[in-house]
Amino acid sequence: MKKILFVTSEAHPFIKTGGLADVSGSLPKALAALSQDIKIIMPYYQATKTFADIGYRCSLRVDNRDVNILETLMPDSQVTVWLIDCPEFYQQPGNPYVDAQGNPWFNNAERFALLCRIAVEVAMNRAYLDWKADIVHCNDWQTGLAPALLSLEDNRPATVFTIHNMAYQGLFPTTVLTALNLPGQLWHPEGLEFHDMLSFIKGGLVYADRITTVSPTYALEIQTALYGYGLEGLLIHRSPDLVGIINGIDTTLWNPETDTYIPQHYNADSLDDKQHNKAELQKRMGLPVDSQIPVLGLIGRLVEQKGIDLIIDCLPELLAMPVQFVLLGSGDKSFEQRLQNLMHLYPDKLAITLGYNEELAHLIEAGADIFLMPSRFEPCGLNQMYSQRYGTIPIVRKTGGLADTVVDSIPENIVNHTATGIVFNDANASALLEAIKRTLLLYRLPDAWTNMQKNAMHSDFSWQQSAERYLDLYQNIQP
């Protein structure tokens, strides 16, 4: 049994801004199910939702600051969660990283440096918790200083650093160095320095014993200039220690046989029942109820990374076809405005809900026939896996985790019953439109379509497989 300290800046259901929270809420539970002793440590934000009792465990003085560590449990598990209670740093309202205007909190460097310092104290058994880690598993830039600081410790635990998205690096001007009081031996171009700035992510990339990212294809992509954001050389250098492990999904939460958010349960043997959800989705979105018309769905951030501009560019031609399109998301205000303008032009074909709604997200996955995910880059992606589980055929661009989780419906894959979706290569509107046309041709072939739905629904995207790969990694590293 390994003692694993899982260091994260967010975890579902306590607080969530993106996929990191989903991983932090699911992977520790899957590792605990494999009989590992795993503890999560994260900040106690003002917006943190709590479920079980929270108890006081200890107080630490770190960097001339008094900090409490509180303890609770991850819901539906016995996984201990240690919450770092420091009101001066974590009691801002709302989002953990940015204010209401979308600007980063002015003291983010100090806030997340504290998370890393406390993680080190806990991992080294200096926190009065009578527990010393064998493995410290850090996630994204907010935790990047922990492997760097641990590299200076004697008899330290092994360290793993997971990249969930290379686009976010935690870069700060050198003026923060005084406030952070970092050891001088970490400050050099082969260490935390990056073009005269402090880079939190480099702490993980340089000093962790092993680096993981959230899909095998993304592990290769980040070693190129297009996806490496200036750190591709370092990642190539560390490539012997870099591995891509695909994220799992919560198969209890996303299960068409038991989903409490959808009106009609179904499985691969009762696909006709999916039509009830389609009718309900059409009704709810104010679209004509018609079982023959294919419904395309999209749930996600309306930003360039997600290829929303590709969709907008091909919408007039797409909506000239016999289809309906349902979209749930928010993001770039100009994309939101253009989509709303198009909705007024095509009220019987296009329905948009701005914002996020969990119930509607589940209904779209269950009620749509086709799911669009034309991302420019996608480290892992979850919705293409949810879609397959619900027999909703994904159209994805061949990048990152999308390439690793969707099997294209080329003729040989249709014949050997492995096809689960449609994959296209180029990040432009015409390539997307061709992929949609190819999908609509298949939709008109009921036997081929049903076979593809069943293939997709039988895919195994559970966390158990991923957890076993992480456990294998943990067991084979030496600090």
Image: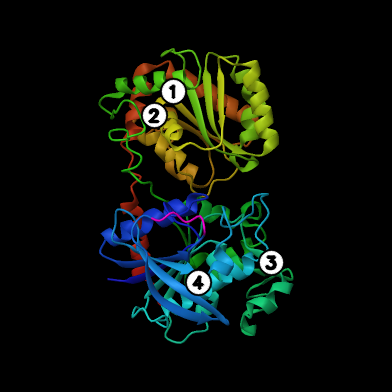
**Amino acid type of disc 3?**
Phe
**Amino acid type of disc 2?**
Ala
Look at mark 3 in the image and give the residue it sits on. 172
**3D distance between C-alphas at marks 1 and 2:** 9 Å
| Mark 1 touches mark 2? (CB < 8 Å) | yes
Local SS, label 4: loop
Please give the name of the residue rendered at 46% of the width and 74% of the height, measured from the top-left corner: 68
Local SS, label 2: helix
Q: Which mark is residue 194?
A: none
Indicate the position of residue 269 as horizontal and vertical percent values: 25, 26
Pointer 3: residues within 10 angstroms few (<14), some, or many (20+)? Answer: some
Q: Could you tell me what secondary structure mostly forms the magenta stretch?
A: loop
Local SS, label 3: strand
Please give the name of the residue rendered at 36% of the width and 69% of the height, measured from the top-left corner: 4
Look at mark 4 in the image and give the residue it sits on. 208
- How does the figure colour the protein chain or chains? rainbow
Indicate the position of residue 177 as horizontal and vertical percent values: 68, 76
Look at mark 1 in the image and give the residue it sits on. 281
Pointer 1: residues within 10 angstroms few (<14), some, or many (20+)? Answer: many
Query: Is 48 inside the magenta-drawn segment?
Result: yes
Give whichever of discs 3 and 1 has the lower sequence position.
3
**3D distance between C-alphas at marks 2 and 4:** 41 Å
- Quarter of the image where the N terminus is located: bottom left
Q: Is residue 422 above or below residue 211?
A: above
| Mark 2 touches mark 3? (CB < 8 Å) | no
Indicate the position of residue 45 as horizontal and vertical percent values: 51, 60
Please give the name of the residue rendered at 42% of the width and 75% of the height, measured from the top-left corner: 158
Q: Between 158 and 359, which is closer to the camera in this rendering?
A: 359
Span of residues in magenta? 46-50
Look at mark 2 in the image and give the residue it sits on. 366
Pointer 4: residues within 10 angstroms few (<14), some, or many (20+)? Answer: many
